[in-house]
Structure formats: C-alpha cells, structure tokens
Image (cartoon, rainbow, N blue to C red):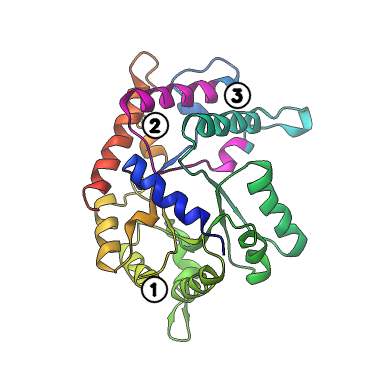
Amino acid sequence: MNIKYISQLRQSAERTGSIVCMGLDPIADYLPVRTGSVRNDLVDFFAAVFDQMLARKVFPGAFKPNIGYYHVLDRPRNGDFSGSLALSDILRMTTDLFPDIPVILDAKRGDIALSSSNYAREAFTCWGADAVTLSPYMGSDSVVPFLAHGKGVYILNRTSNPGAADFQDLAVSGEPFYIRVARQIAAWAEEYPGTGAVVGATSPDELSAIAEVYAGTEVPLLIPGVGSQGGSGRETVQRLKKAGYDPVLARINSSSGITHPWKNSPPPPDSPWAAAVVSNLEALNQETGSQL
C-alpha cells in the first residue's frame, strides 16, 4: 500500500501553511512582457513570480499546470515545441526551488487498456508529475492503470463548469450521479491510497454532499472554481470541516485569479506585477488558512 502522495500533501501543508493550489496556466496575450519568444516569456514570467515567492516566503500547497495551455503554443508539424519546452523548464524550476510542494498535472486523461497506461506514463514518467487529473467516464479499466502507479490521481467528480449539471447531476437509482462517482472513488482509494477527487467550489451544496461521502477517509480533494470563477475559499473550508472532512488533504485551486489579476485590463509591463501575483496567493492563503 503506497501512501506517499498523502504524506506529500500533509507535509506540504505543514511546511507552507497553505492548502492553496496555484494554477500555472499562462495566457500569452496577458503576459506583461512579450519578447517574441513564447518559451522565454513564459519561463521568465514564472521565474520572476517564484523569486518573489522565495523573497516573501509565500508559497502554495501545490502547483497545477494545465497541459493544454502549453500544448496550444506548440506547432509540431513545424518542429516548434515552444509550449512543451516552456512547461519542462517551469516544472524543472518548481522541482529545484520547491521540492516539497507537489505538482498536479491537469491533463484530464482517460482511455482504456494500453492507451490509458500510456497516458499514465506520460504524466508520471515523461513529465514527472506527482499527481494527474483523470476522467472516470470509461470506468475501472480506464482508471486503474493510473492508480497502479502509486501516485496521486484526481478523478473528476463534480466539476466547477456550468455544463457540469448536464450529466453529473443526473439521478441514478435515486441519487445524483456525482454521489455514485464519489462512492466509487472512495472504494478505489481504499485499495489505492492517493486516489482523490475533483470537486468544484462553485457548487457549494454539492461540495458539502460529496465531502460527507469522503468524511473520515484520506481521499484528497482538488477544488477548482475559487477566484475568477466565483467560488469562496473561506466557505469551501467551512463546508469541508462541517462535513467532517480534513481540509489539510484538500487543495483549493485558483489559476488566473492568482497569476493574471490584470486580465480584464492591459498588462502592466512597468508595474510590480510579480509582487501582485504573490500578493494574490498570500491573500488566498490567509483566507483559507484562517479557517483551518
């Protein structure tokens, strides 16, 4: 039984004082400085942010790059892998500078048999991630190849997007489908510790119901939707605690709400933008940490 990822989460929360997951999802048009080299721009952006984090001793409890934000910058048929190379550089920085903070690769994979095994190797061997996000739609033969690696796996349970209700809220044998999924995730977690769930903060009542399923377990939760999507970090922690779930195992994610606070206005090339990013992280740390 491998409980390494559970230990990573507990230790990172203790050492950083944070249960915030910092999304590393760069939007090229919003970068404050653009030189014409997208790889250099992305790497320089996060290098400046990481320098500010170290100087101010403000850290998240996890990092989460969404692979799509990097792949979209590649032009493979032209031999251009700028986005993927930038992701590689950024992951190397996180490992070198913050070795105790886990990295969740947000890839939302899911296939069957050998294909699923290949996607798992992509996340854990190719990219060296500590955890990955995964769709459960194709069932156990899609999920188990990921779980067998003994790493962290966050399975989509009740997501934060408006269209989530189209399928996830459907009634199955008298209860919402997302509750059935939660029960299956809890069952997988008994055999494969480190199995977790993605549950959005934008649907707080659903979050409470799902947290009750996981109460008393060690199922890690990845909770997107805080910040620019409208979810509340404070309310999220309160609901987890009220349900009997240990919030230390949760990671409350904010992406653009932390890293692109100026996205509705022109980028600030001459202002202390890296400090603004870290201030946003610090504010969410304080909002969530005050409830622990």
Q: Which mark is residue 149?
A: none
- Point out the frontmost of discs 2 and 3: 3
Mark sitting earlier along the chain (2/1): 1
Residue under numbered circle 3? 39
Q: SS for tag 3?
A: helix
Among the 4 quarters of the image, the one containing residue 40: top right
> Any mark on residue 263, and which?
2
Q: Which residue is mark 1?
A: 213
Three-letter residue code for mark 3: Arg
Mark 2 or mark 3: name the one nearer the start of the chain.
3
Task: Find numbered disc 1 in the image and state the secondary structure of the residue it sits on.
Answer: helix
Reading the chain from its start, which is encountered first: label 3 or label 1?
A: 3
Q: Nearer the viewer, mark 3 or mark 1?
A: 1
Which quadrant, please, contains the N terminus? bottom right
User: Which range is magenta?
Assistant: 41-70
In the image, is 235 to the left or to the right of 40?
Answer: left
Instruction: Judge whether residue 59 is colored magenta.
Output: yes
Asked whether residue 204 is drawn in magenta, I would say: no
Give the CA distance from mark 2 to mark 3: 20 Å
Do we see residue 224 in this rendering?
no
Residue 223 position, x and y percent, is: 40, 54
Q: Vertically, is 253 above or below 32?
A: below
Q: Is residue 292 left or right of residue 13?
A: left
Q: Residue at x 36, y 41 (%)?
A: 15
Residue 14: horizontal and vertical position, in percent?
A: 34, 46
CA gap, disc 2 to disc 1? 37 Å
Magenta: main secondary structure equals helix
Instruction: Determine crowd level at label 2: few under 14, some 14-19, many 20+ residues with C-alpha closer than 10 A.
Output: some
Q: Amino acid at mark 2?
A: Lys
Q: Residue furthest bottom?
A: 173
